Structures are given as C-alpha cells and as structure tokens.
Amino acid sequence: MLDDKIKITYLLEIHLLQGGFMIQTNEFHKGFLSLKNLKLDALNKLLERAQEFKRKSPKQYPKLERKVGALFYKNNSTTQLAFELAVKNLDCQLLALEAAQINSSEMRLRQNLDTLISLGASTVGLMHFQSWAGHYAQSVCKLPIINCGDGSTEDPVTALATILTILEQQNKKNLKECRVLLVGDILHSGLAKSLIYILRILEAEIILCGPRTLLPPEFAEWGCIVEYNLREAIKNVDALIPLSLNAEALIDKNFIPSRKEYATLYGINQGVLNLAKSELIIMYPGELTLGTEISKDIFENQQNNIMSDRENLVYLYMAIIFEILGGEAGEATN
Amino acid sequence: MKLLIKNGTLINPAKLQHEVGDILIEDTKIIEIANRIKETPDMKIYDAAGQYVCPGFIDMHTHMREPGQEGKEGLVTGTQAAAAGGFTTIVTMANTTPVVDNAFLLKGLMQRASEDAIVKVKFFGAISKGLKGEELAEIGLMAAAGAVGFSDDGHYVENANLMRRALEYGSMFGKIIVDHAEDMTMAACGHMHEGNVSYELGIPARPSMAESIAVARDILIAEAVKAPIHIAHISTKEGVELVRAAKKRGLTQVTCEVTSQHLTFTDEDLKTHGSAMKMAPPIRSEDHRQALLEGLHDGTIDAIITDHAPHTPLEKDQEFCCTPNGFTGLETSIGAVITRAVKTGYLTIDRMVEVMSVNPAKLLGIEGGVLEVGKAADITVIDSNQVWTVDRNKFYTKGKTNPFHGMELTGKAVLTVVDGKIVMKNGIVV
C-alpha cells in the first residue's frame, strides 16, 4: 500500500518534472532575440508551426489565455499590427504601452519592462530604434523578450516571414543552390543581418548589393558575395529582397548624395528586372518608398512575381509566442 | 614614528636598482635604503618578502568628477580607489562641471584635495575655455596656480590652429599638452570600435582612422612648432605606428599613453559586457590590442593610465547607445597590467614601474618615480603572484559598473604609502 503511494507520488513527480522540463528546455524560453545561433531543427519547428497556424481556421487556434506585453518604440508599423494580431489570435491579452509614454525620457526601458512584469505579462514583444536594445532588455528582464526589430542589430521575425514566403513560393524545405540577393542599406539594416543568418542556415547563396558606404567589404567574411553593381548582381538570382532606406538620415550623414541617385543606381525598376531571371521572386516588405528603393512600373508588369511577407509575419509571431509560452506543454496545461 | 619595509625586492628603475633590500621611512621621507636595516623598537615593520617595493604609482589620467558630478565620483571615494589600487598620485582631468579652465577654480580644487584626498591629487587645466575648442584658456595663470598640464580630454581639439597655439603657448611654461586624439567628424556618432563586431551588433561605430588622423595631425603640429605633445589613451595600431615613426625620426617631444582596459579587452568582449565596457576611444579589436602591447614592449608607449571614468550605475544601465563613455580602472589596473602585459612577457616588472611611475613623473615634471633617500616616501608594494577575483562590490569607487567584475587577475597592490603614511594595506584603505 505504502509502496504504491510512493510509486504514485514518484510517477507524479516525474510527470511534473517532465512537464516542467519540457518548458525549461524549450530553446525559446530565454527569449527570441537573434537568428545567429538558431539551429536548423528549431528553425524548421518554427516554420512548420507557422504553416500549421496558416492551415487552421481561426476557431482552431490554441487559446493560450496569457498576457503578452508590447513595447513598440516606433509607432504604427506593420510589424506592430502583425504582432498585435498574433497575440489576439492566440486569445492572449495584449498589454501595450503607448509609444508617447515609452519614449518619454523619464521612463526607461527597464522601468517599462518592470511595469509589464508587474501587470503579469508572460513575454514581451520589443521594437526599439536603438541597436542592440533587445540584448539589453533581455539582460535586465527575466521574461522572454521577442525581438520585433532593434535598430540595426536584427529583425528576426520579419526575416523568418520573408524566408517562409520564399520557401513556400519555391515549394522547398531549404534553399540549397538558391541565390538570394539583398539590395540596399546592409550596414544599418537589422533585417539584413537576420536574413543573412537564416539564409546561411538554409545554405542559400547570399549576394549583397548596395553603395560601398552602406556595404563594407567585410561582409564578404560573413559568407556573402559583395557586389556594388546592381545590374551585375541581379543576374541569375532566384529571390530579391530590397531593404528599406532611411534616406534622409543617410543623406544627412553623407552615406548617399540623394534619393534620386540612389534610385538610379540601386532602385529596383523594370529595367533592372529585365536583366533578371523571369521566375525571380521579388519580396515587397511594404515599408519601401515607391520611387526610391522600388519603382512603380514593376507593379504594372503582370509577369513580375511580387510577394508580401505580411501574412506570414502574423503566423510567425503566433508560432514564436506559442513556443515561448510553453508550446504544446503550455497548451496542454491550458 | 618610523616605518620599515623590509625583505622586499626594490624595483627602482630610475636608479637601475632591482635587488632585495629594506627601506626606512621617517615621517614623510625615505631616510635610508640598504640591503639590511636593523630593526629598532620605534619602528613599525612591514615584511615585504616575496613582494616588489616600487616608487609610488602615478596615474596621469583620471576623472574625479569634482566639482559638479559628485554622483559619479568625488575626491574622497576617488582617492580611496586610487589607494586601494596602489596609486600614490593621480592626475584628474578638467572636464568637470564647471570646467577647470581658470586658476580660481583650480586653487579651490587643490584646497579641497588637500583636505579630502588620501593620495596626492594633481590637476590638468583645460586647453580651451569651457572645453569648447574655440578660445585658449588661461594656461599661464593655471600653470602658475599649480596645473601640471593641459587637456580638453573627452574632446578632441578639432581646431588645428587652436592646437598649434596651445602647443606653442603651453611650451613656455614647461607643461605637457595632452590631446584626446579622435577626429569627431568621424567618431562623434559612434559607440564602439568599427569592424565586424560593430557590423554584427549594428551599433554606430568609431573607426580607428578617426584616431590615427588626429594623432598624425598632432604630431605634425608638434614637430613644426617644436613643442611637446602627449597623445592620450592611444588605442589603434595605426596610432602606435605614427608615434613610433615620430620617435624614430628624433621627435622626443612626442609621447603617448595607453589604458590598462585597452590592454585587456577586445570588441568581442563587448557582447558579454555591454555598456560596462563602453569607453572613448573604444575598446578595439585583437589586432589593435596586440599592437598596443608591442608598443609598450618596444618603448613607443610611455605610460599606462587608467582613464578612471566613473558613472552612476543608473547612467550605465540603459540601452547601449544611451549610456555614457567610460568606466573605472584604478582598482583593477595593476592586476590587469600584470596579467596581460607582465605575465605574457611584454613588460618586465621594471618596465612596468617605468611606465606606471617613472615616466608619468617625468612627463608631468612632478616629484616621484624614484626611491631615494630624502625624497617623499610614496611607495607601492606589489604582490605579483597574488591571484584574485575582481568584486565590484568591494570597490571604493562609486563607479561600480565594470567589466573586470568576476574576472580573475594575477597581481595586486598590497601596500600603498603616501608621504610615509600607510593609506592601504592588503586591499583595505586605512
């Protein structure tokens, strides 16, 4: 009798331990800041999870019923909308601080995080204009941070959404022998860094193109081909990702002379696309300025395969929030 | 009362001395140096067996933050940190609030130091009024009041003509002019060394050429006007090479210094330490660190400093790009230098004393840098084999944010004597 009791307690403990252990060893429980050291299986898990959500009807979404904080130091971005929608889809409560409030000089990032913790947030989505702010936030906050873009450091989830879109288009699991071209301000683009990391994991051939001031040749050491002539770079690529340009700031700091010159040398227009493969996938992240990074005429040509990553962005935020909040184990508890 | 420091190895490069011996101190002066001095009952004894007895260490580049920034540091805590770290004299920079750009303020500060400081404190005056880089400060009057040199540290003297006049004018008074050589048109927006790590972190960076361009200009001006220039906290291989070349062609008036932090860390470490390791000029990559060690080894670099630059923990606890430059160094410098330069063979212990005591005294034209009968008893005793773990909570400085925290260092000051008085023993400030 006693033995049985001990046995049951023991089994219960094992069960709890395993449950706890599963949550503890989830690779995302320490936050989702960077793609640099992401393992291939973790990447596949996220992509598959996102696709699973994509296949389901909203009624089938898991109900996590947790609180998710949002600190967006940039207002009105499509990323913010995607994040908020993901939170709602998982039946979580959004704790969002107003941009005006979080930008106040008295309210530091750490205090804002403390506020969200005290209100019961289980994870926090952070978008910050300061580079490496995600790393800082995670170093002072015990909650897992979801990096929704921190300055020029990384924008991991957008990168995942972009790559998922390309994979879906190509109907592939990896990007072996696929040539992907990133065009623009590589130096200041967090998205570019995240894309490089994930493209390396998927074994794609990465070509970087942009003005020399915004693309130091050292990027060749990152396993990328560095090319300054867009008309050369575009040849034989399978996917093209134009990066958004903060033109005014770059002109101000003498990185580029003018919008017009940038558009002439590095803007994606039909003339450039005519040099490319006909089945080229063009990613259009939506934050590009028409006439600078990308020209209007390319939308008029029906042959162009222009894709948006915004829909996938929602599913990827859902996948990441789901994994961070315990994944299947969390779902079972709920 | 007499103090006898016995059985230690005397490291006295100014007298080409490296031998076991005893030093007897009475009141403020050294009264005897001999192989063996007989103990008498009126003597306090310190047994320095197995330890190095050196002329007091001089840090010719610190920030005591007084007046105006006492939240970061003050003369009391700052000099306690100096004593704890084995420094008997420190020199503090003029970038306080208000700026030390006039004799009146300088005299007041010297008075404060005479009341509150537990080690000797010397002062740099500003080169330009308000550190604005526009008009010369009253260099002559400050020199007369006791300034040991002049520097706009924290700011590069951008205006080449002003730099020329400062060198010409300053040389009349025999005082050193120290330039924070970093071209701000290139470096102002940066927060770390430019290179692969800055590209990875996406942090705006300060390229090494911002320093080398400024160093080259300063050397050319100093050469043309035949006046001395001292390059503050040199941090790049190109900068070191320029100073080396200048010295080679006989420009003895060109000198430079390096921080113990730049000898220890690289930009890769920033990924771990974050804002605790942020300073200007920035901690650079490994090739630059190696070049600095080489520069020390071949005598291109004249002095090791700490650039002790405390900030409040709150100021350092922000997003990386929002935090101020600088961190503390007084309490870790000797350990860092022994660990990174002496134990690795770049410096002998004698050369270490040269660059941390003899040369700073010479460059500043102040007393010190030598163990000599009749001279002030400023002495630093070092245990070069003591292995210790840095604990910022034991720091005397207010600037607790420090990348050395938790690091194991070899070598430590175990006794600091200022004017014959023990101010630190075994890490405890007396």
Image (cartoon, rainbow, N blue to C red):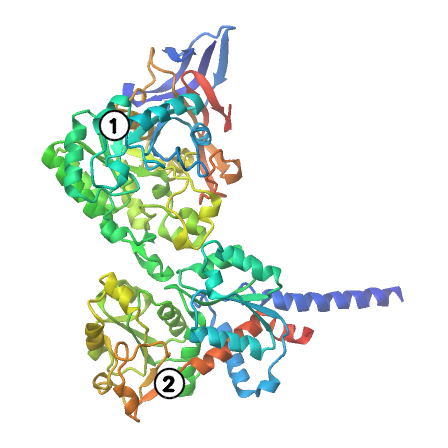
The residue most toward the left is: B224
Q: Amino acid at mark 1?
A: Leu
* CA neighbours of label 1 inside 10 A, class few (<14), some (14 to 19), many (20+): many
Picture layout, residue A84 above or below residue B424: below
Q: Is residue A300 visible?
A: yes
Residue drawn 31% across the image and 32% down it: B100
Estimate the spatial distance between the alpha carbons at disc 2 and disc 1, rounded to whole Å: 66 Å
User: Percent x, y for residue B36?
Assistant: 41, 11
Badge count: 2
User: Percent x, y for residue A204?
Assistant: 36, 77
User: Percent x, y for residue B248?
Assistant: 14, 36
User: Percent x, y for residue B289?
Assistant: 31, 45
Side of A303 where A311 appears, left or right: right
* CA neighbours of label 2 inside 10 A, class few (<14), some (14 to 19), many (20+): some
Write down the chain letter for disc 2. Answer: A
Residue drawn 43% across the image and 25% down it: B117
Q: Which residue is mark 1?
A: B363
The image quarter in which residue A265 lies: bottom left
In the image, which is nearer the foreground, mark 2 or mark 1? 2
Q: Secondary structure at mark 2?
A: strand
Q: Which residue is mark 2?
A: A307
